[in-house]
Each structure stands twice: as structure tokens, then as C-alpha cells.
Image (cartoon, helix red, strand yellow):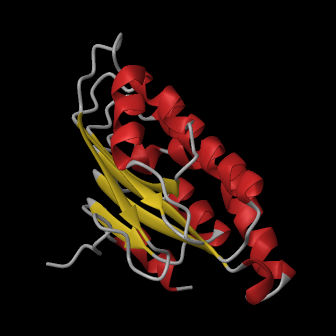
Amino acid sequence: MCLQVLANFVNLQSLSLCPFSSKMAMLLRRADFNLSDFRIILWDWGPFGIGSAGNEDIETAISGFDKLMASKSLRNLKEFRFAVSSGSNDVDLYLRRVHTVVEAIVEHQSLLEKLVLAVHRSDSSFSLLPRLVNLKALSWCCHEGNGMEFSTLAVKQSIHQAFQLSPAKPVIEVSRHDWGEFPRGFTPIVD
């Protein structure tokens, strides 16, 4: 696998992976580099995609997220960008997956300064984020689809309220995006 070659790049500091898989997560957990910038997108095609093997891989990647965030290669992570691109209409499943990821981030990434999440508009995982006391910037990219209207201002106010008692006072940006587009703030790392 091509990712096994990454082990040779001991000075690697930035990595963008899309689509992210459970095999990639396993290799990253064993890697001997020290990332400061990590960007991943999981592709969940639901009933429109590659079948149950793809869904099983996503479940494996999500269930192993705690171990990934605790891995040596991410011990000094400063910037993290995460999205699940979903073809599924199961909002509850999507919200559980993102919540699992956010819990792992909060538990293991105390040095994190910038976080970009592409989330569902009704996701309330932001209530966990005030525990990231070093957070300086938060970009909350809300999925917009099926003609559902929502207020980015209301979402931003809710996030600000969650941080009210936190020592962290990040700059908060809330934006809309459609899954058909690459979420703003998720530009691949290119030098």
C-alpha cells in the first residue's frame, strides 16, 4: 500500500487524506512522524455506493477514532480538518459518527489551535469543544441540502454560548456547504 511509504517521511508535518479509510488510520497510528496539520474526509455513499464493505470500513474507521487521536503521530497536532461526505439520509447515524469523532478530538488533542468540521446543521457536538482550551479558530461548515433552511447566525450564537465559560475564545466561523462541493476550508495541502 502507498501509505506504508509514509513511514519513510519522518519529518512529515502536514497530511491530507481523502477518502480516509480504516487501513489508513491503522498505518497512521503506527507511524513515526509528528503531524501538526491533518485533514481527512470520509466518504459514506450509503445505499448509492460500493455496498456494505464501504459502510463497514467507515464504521471501523469511526470506532477506531479514539485510538487514532491518541496516536503518537498526532501528539502535537495544531490544526485538524474533518468531514464525512454522506450519501445516506440517516441523519441520526451521521450525528453519532461526528459526535464520536469530536469526543476523540476533545479527549486527546489538548494542543489543537484550529479545527474545521463539516457537520450536519443540527449537530450539537460543538458543546464539547470548550474543553479545547488552546483553540484559536473554529470553522463549523454546516451541510445544506434537501431545501432545508437554517440560520448560520443562530448556529454561531449557540457555539459562542458554549464557549462562554471556557478560557478558549476562538474566532468562530459558520458557513453553509453542499456535499456536492468541497467544503470551504478543506482545500488540500499543496505546496
Q: Position of residue 104 (x, y in %)?
A: 57, 38
* Residue 70 seen in the figure: no
In the displayed structure, 8 sits above or below 149; it is below
Q: Position of residue 165 (x, y in %)?
A: 35, 10
Image side of residue 42 versus residue 51, left or right: left
Number of numbered callouts drawn: 0
Query: Given the current orientation, which residue lies at the most extreme right position?
Result: 52
Please state, as top left, top right, bottom left or bottom right, where the C terminus lies in the image: bottom left
* Residue 8 seen in the figure: yes
Please state, as top left, top right, bottom left or bottom right, where the N terminus lies in the image: bottom right
Q: Position of residue 44 (x, y in %)?
A: 67, 74
In the displayed structure, 187 sits above or below 135; it is below
Image side of residue 126 versus residue 122, left or right: left
Q: Residue at x 58, y 62 (%)?
A: 25
Q: Nearer the viewer, residue 2 or 52?
A: 52
Q: Position of residue 112 (x, y in %)?
A: 32, 37
Query: Given the current orientation, which residue lies at the most extreme left position?
Result: 191
In the displayed structure, 169 sits above or below 30; it is above
Q: Residue at x 47, y 82 (%)?
A: 180
Image side of residue 139 versus residue 180, left or right: left
In the displayed structure, 9 sits above or below 98; it is below
Q: Nearer the viewer, residue 21 or 156?
A: 156
Q: Residue at x 51, y 55 (%)?
A: 119
Q: Residue at x 21, y 34 (%)?
A: 136
Q: Nearer the viewer, residue 186 or 77?
A: 186
